[in-house]
Image (tube, helix red, strand yellow):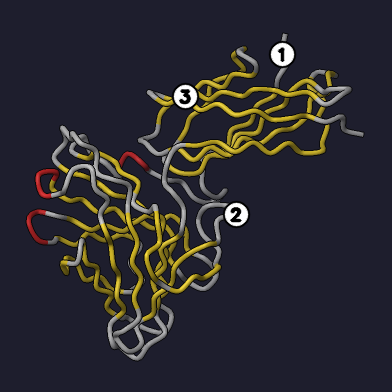
């Protein structure tokens, strides 16, 4: 029988609380907003997701700097009002306020600005809406968070991805916008640590499950080799769950499963003896 120690860190950073319930409504059919880069400057920078640094960068210099990418295909059937695309983004406004233009499938749809607002909503054509929600402000004052684009479900082409392009205006500023190259889908990454903890005198080995949860916050159940360990609360985005598993004397595979709502995420971690 497993004797476990589990500590849930259900925030992007220790100082940030994410109110995911304010992000979405029953009118939203969530779709991953970044799949494939088409063009743009590759750039490495910190983000609101631990370990994520790969991005595409555009600046508001001469009006010719741009990036373009594709989303996941739009599902064949959407019962909600909106096809709602979400991707990880950052906005740098230190050098000054500058305009960025966003087009959808080649049609200019929104203009937003590199200002210091942590949250904003911009109405577009045909009842569409572009939103930004900051969940982290870094040491330079840059805002990191999510772009959320709502397109009326009856206006998108089913079975096809959406092409999104962002062009910097001719503001002669180095103000910038980034789209991070991460697929926004539910998944889990397991990281064993060379550490032994005491749990009522029984040694346990520390494993961290990094869960990226692409849905509204909910309770989850965590299993190891089919045995229920505990329940945890997942918020939209990054969740770090630290689990203590019985110490091993030889290499041992452990299958961890996270069940949350309609999602079931399974991965296997190999534990090695720790000195």
**Mark on residue 2?**
1
Q: Residue, x 47% and y 33% (percent of image)?
A: 234
Judge by depth and name the residue closer to the eye, 177 or 145: 177
Q: Is residue 176 above or below residue 221?
A: below
Q: CA distance from mark 3 to mark 1?
A: 21 Å
* Image quadrant where residue 275 sits: top right
* Distance of label 1 from label 2 (alpha carbons): 30 Å
Query: Which residue position is annotated with label 2?
Result: 51
For label 1, the crowd category at 10 Å Cα-Cα, with few meaning under 14, some 14 to 19 and many 20 or more, is few
Which quarter of the picture shows residue 177? bottom left
**Residue 7, percent across and down?**
63, 31
Q: Secondary structure at mark 3?
A: strand
Left or right placement of residue 167 versus residue 220 in this view: left
Within 10 Å of the Cα at label 2, are there few (<14), some (14-19), or many (20+) other Cα atoms?
few
Q: Which residue is mark 3?
A: 264
| Mark 3 or mark 1, whichever is nearer to me | 3
């Amino acid at each position: 029988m497993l004797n476990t120690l589990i500590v849930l860190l259900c925030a992007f950073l220790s100082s940030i609380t994410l109110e995911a319930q304010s992000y979405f409504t029953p009118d939203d059919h969530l779709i991953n907003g970044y799949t494939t880069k088409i063009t743009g400057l590759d750039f490495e920078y910190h983000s609101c997701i631990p370990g994520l640094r790969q991005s595409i960068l555009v600046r508001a210099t001469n009006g010719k700097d741009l990036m373009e990418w594709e989303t996941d295909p739009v599902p064949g059937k959407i019962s909600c009002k909106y096809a709602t695309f979400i991707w990880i983004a950052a906005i740098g406004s230190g050098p000054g306020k500058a305009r960025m233009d966003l087009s959808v499938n080649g049609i200019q749809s929104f203009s937003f600005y590199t200002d210091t607002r942590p949250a904003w909503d911009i109405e577009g054509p045909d009842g569409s809406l572009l939103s930004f929600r900051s969940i982290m402000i870094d040491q330079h004052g840059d805002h990191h968070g999510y772009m959320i684009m709502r397109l009326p479900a009856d206006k998108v082409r089913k079975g096809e991805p959406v092409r999104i392009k962002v062009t910097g205006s001719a503001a002669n500023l180095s103000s910038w916008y980034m789209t991070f190259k991460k697929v926004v889908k539910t998944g889990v990454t397991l990281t064993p640590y060379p550490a032994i903890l005491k749990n009522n005198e029984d040694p346990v080995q520390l494993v961290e499950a990094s869960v990226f949860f692409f849905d509204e916050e909910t309770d989850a159940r965590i299993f190891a080799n089919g045995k229920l360990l505990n329940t945890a609360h997942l918020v939209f985005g990054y969740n770090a769950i630290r689990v203590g598993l019985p110490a091993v004397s030889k290499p041992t595979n452990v299958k961890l499963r996270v069940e949350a709502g309609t999602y079931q995420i399974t991965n296997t971690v190999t534990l090695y003896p720790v000195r």
